[in-house]
Structure formats: C-alpha cells, structure tokens
Amino acid sequence: MLRIQGVSKTFFPGTVNERRALVDVSLHLRERDFVTVIGSNGAGKSTLLNVVAGSIRPDAGAIAIAGRDVTRLDDHQRAAYVGRVFQNPSSGTAPHLTIAENLAIAQSRGKKRTLGMAVTARKRMTYRDELSILEQGLEDRLGDWVGLLSGGQRQSLSLLMATFTRPQILLLDEHTAALDPTRAGLVIKLTRELVERHRLTTLMVTHNMEQALSMGNRLIMMHAGRIILDVADEEKAKMTVADLMKSFENLRDAELSDRTLLQ
Ligand SMILES: Nc1ncnc2c1ncn2[C@@H]1O[C@H](COP(=O)(O)OP(=O)(O)OP(=O)(O)O)[C@@H](O)[C@H]1O
C-alpha cells in the first residue's frame, strides 16, 4: 500500500546548519498495516510523514502509494490518497467556517473544486450520520463555527475529516499530544474505531510509549534519520515500555561513547 524506497532528505546541505533528517529510509506498509513511529526529538519522524504527504520533496528515493509512484506529486496532488491529522487542533480545520462547511471541504479533497462544495440537505444528513460516530453531540451543531469547539472536539473533527474520503494512507502526527489525558483518550478511542471501520493503512507518530505499544500491528523506532528498530505482530505484542526505554538508553550510551571516541 505504501512503499518508501531509499528516501533521504538533508536540510541546508553544505552549510553549518546542515540537518540530515532522513538517511536512506525504506519502509513498506501492507494494506491495513497500522504502524506506530517513535523516536527522540529530531529523529526524522515528522519529516518521514511530510515526504509521504508530499509537503517535503526528498533529495533521493521514491514513494509509491497503492502502486502509483507519487514521488513527483506535490501535497495537493496527493490529497486524494493521503489523510493527515497534525498535533495542533487548529491545523486540520478552518475556524471561521462552520462544521458543515469544514466537512464539505474534506469531502471535496483531491477532487476538482466544483459546485460539489455546496452544503446540500442530503450532505447535511450524511454529515450528521458521520458526526454521530464522535459521540460529542456535534451532529446537532452543523452550523456552529469550528473556532467555538474545544481542542478535543476539533481534533476529533480533524480525524473525521482526514478519513472522510477513505484515504489510502492515514498520517497521524502526534495528534493527541496537545490534549489533556481524558480528551487524548477519547481521540485515541476514535482513532481505533475509524481505522477499523474504514480498514485504513496508518502511520502514527507518538511520544507516548504505551500508545505506541498498544496501538497498531507494527512499531518502528527512528534515530538520526534512520529506522533502527522495526517490530511487528507477536514480537511487538511481547514488548514492554521498559524494553523501549532500554532501546533509548542503549542509543544514548552508544552516542556518548561515539563522542568520547571523537575527542
Ligand atoms: N523545515 C525544516 N527546515 C530545516 N530543518 C528541518 C526542517 N524540518 C525538520 N528539520 C530538521 O530535520 C531533523 C528531523 O526533524 P523532524 O521534525 O523530522 O524530527 P522529529 O523526529 O519529528 O522530532 P520531534 O519529535 O521533535 O517532532 C531535525 O534536525 C530538524 O531540526
């Protein structure tokens, strides 16, 4: 479903600010794989999602979604294939438009902008049905501005919007990190339900080890632009937070000894 082959990305190459964000990364997701992505700050997790979404063009390598090479398509051209939810609840929704208008935009994603953007009575019924899945009463607030919603409600709406057109790939970039634990829990429950219901293939970045272990069928750990751990199925099911912490500690130790060697 998603094939990332030998992808590299360096920001500001050849300058003092050079950052090797991705180094020859290859990753293949089968249909309905749900992969959680962990790693320390600056490991390359968001850049990985950005190159899949098309908002960053890699320096080398190729990306194919559902068998189609999308490497040269920009993010607008990939919108029909990719749904995305960001960390900031404001990023996925338009605050000065109503809930119904936001959903109409989501519905038209990846299609030519036509009269289809109008919110018809029939569409309102569909939106009501879809919103009721969130169990937050938003189905009765179709005409409310999205800016009036709480962070958790906006993030739930973002998730619904990202999955509205049943994308080939769902990208979740720390989408619960800005929420309090109760709201984060609700959004995680909703994530599981929507991924299951629409049989989505998903890449989810998180700093929460428990989330990374309890969600999905596969986990990858990134460090310095590379995938350094890739576990799936039973092997993943057996892993504990302590195992993951140990992997992080080993990395730190290895880095410290590298630095000592360089001195
Ligand atoms: N647009 C950019 N311009 C310059 N450097 C960037 C840009 N985006 C990312 N980087 C750099 O690339 C490296 C990887 O960043 P990235 O945001 O992918 O890491 P991350 O694993 O998502 O980190 P975090 O957990 O802190 O969000 C970092 O060194 C970062 O400073």
Image: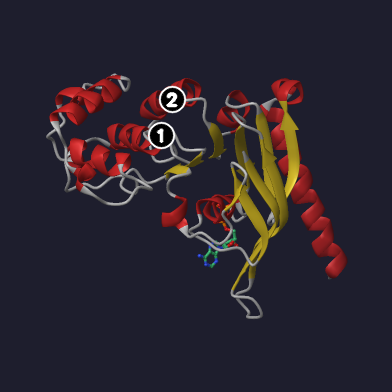
Query: What residue do we see at 38% from left, 48% from top?
Result: 110
Q: Quadrant of the N terminus?
A: top right
Q: Nearer the viewer, residue 128 or 222?
A: 128
Q: Name the residue furthest right.
A: 261
Where residue 60 appears, as percent x and y from the top left, is: 68, 64
Colour style of the rendered protein structure: secondary structure
Q: Is residue 78 left or right of residue 149?
A: right
Query: What residue do we see at 51% from left, 59% from top?
Result: 73
Q: How many marks?
A: 2
Q: Is mark 1 within 8 Å of ligand 1?
A: no
Q: Is mark 2 within 8 Å of ligand 1?
A: no
Q: Is residue 222 left or right of residue 147?
A: right
Residue at image mark 2: 194
Where residue 58 appears, as percent x and y from the top left, is: 61, 63
Q: Is residue 29 left or right of residue 49?
A: right
Can you tell which mark lies on residue 32?
none
Label 2 residue SS: helix
Where residue 178 appears, as percent x and y from the top left, is: 39, 41
Quick check: marks 1 and 2 in contact, CB under 8 Å?
yes
Instruction: Answer above or below: position of 90 versus 58.
Output: above
Q: Quadrant of the C terminus?
A: bottom right
Query: What residue do we see at 43% from left, 25% from top?
Result: 194
Cα gap from disc 1 to disc 2, whole angstroms: 7 Å
Residue at image mark 1: 163
Q: Name the residue furthest bottom.
A: 15
Q: Name the quarter showing ligand 1.
A: bottom right
What's under tag 1, amino acid-wise?
Thr
